[in-house]
Amino acid sequence: MDLINTIIAAKHNLPESLNQINPRSGTHGQPVSEVLVGICEMRGRIAGLSTLCKRFARVLKCVAVETFLNVGGRIYPEVRAVEKRIDMHVDLLRRDEFREMECVSDIAKCVNPSFLCFRKKSIIY
């Protein structure tokens, strides 16, 4: 997911394109487009999901087998589906066919059901 964030930032010239100041005259240029605001929102959601995934992976490495089976084993099918969608977006990036709006939609769906239950579990440090 960090890869998606980095490539999208480079593609949209972030964060420089948010400044919208003409370097020669010092005056403000065009207002920031809604598309660019949406891209920033997507990147924020991806960063949040990425952090949550890293926490999940770390916890699963550290917990007892019984805890893994009780918590991680139950949500593994959901996590596997999320991972498959993320892999699809990375593949689309490689082929230069990335669809920002579809990615935003997928990330919103991922964060809602799958990982919110993980956040509430007491095994997180």
Image (cartoon, rainbow, N blue to C red):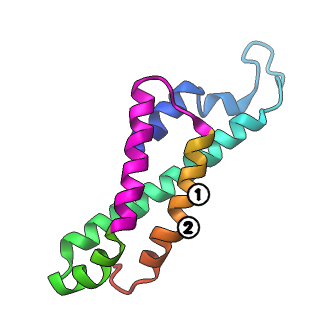
Q: What residue span does the magenta drawing correspond to?
A: 77-100
Residue for badge 2: 112
**What's the residue at 34%, 66% (across, down)?**
77
**What's the residue at 69%, 33% (across, down)?**
18
Image position, residue 108 (x, y; %):
58, 57
Nearest to the observer: residue 68 or residue 53:
68
Residue for badge 1: 108
Disc 2 crowd rating (10 Å Cα; few below 14, some 14-19, many 20+) is few
Tell me if residue 26 is in the magenta stretch: no
- Residue 44: which disc? none
For the residue marked with disc 1, what is the amino acid? Ala
The secondary structure making up most of the magenta span is helix
Tell me if residue 87 is in the magenta stretch: yes
**What's the residue at 54%, 25% (across, down)?**
11
Nearest to the observer: residue 38 or residue 112:
112
Image position, residue 49 (x, y; %):
47, 58
Q: Is residue 123 left or right of residue 14?
A: left
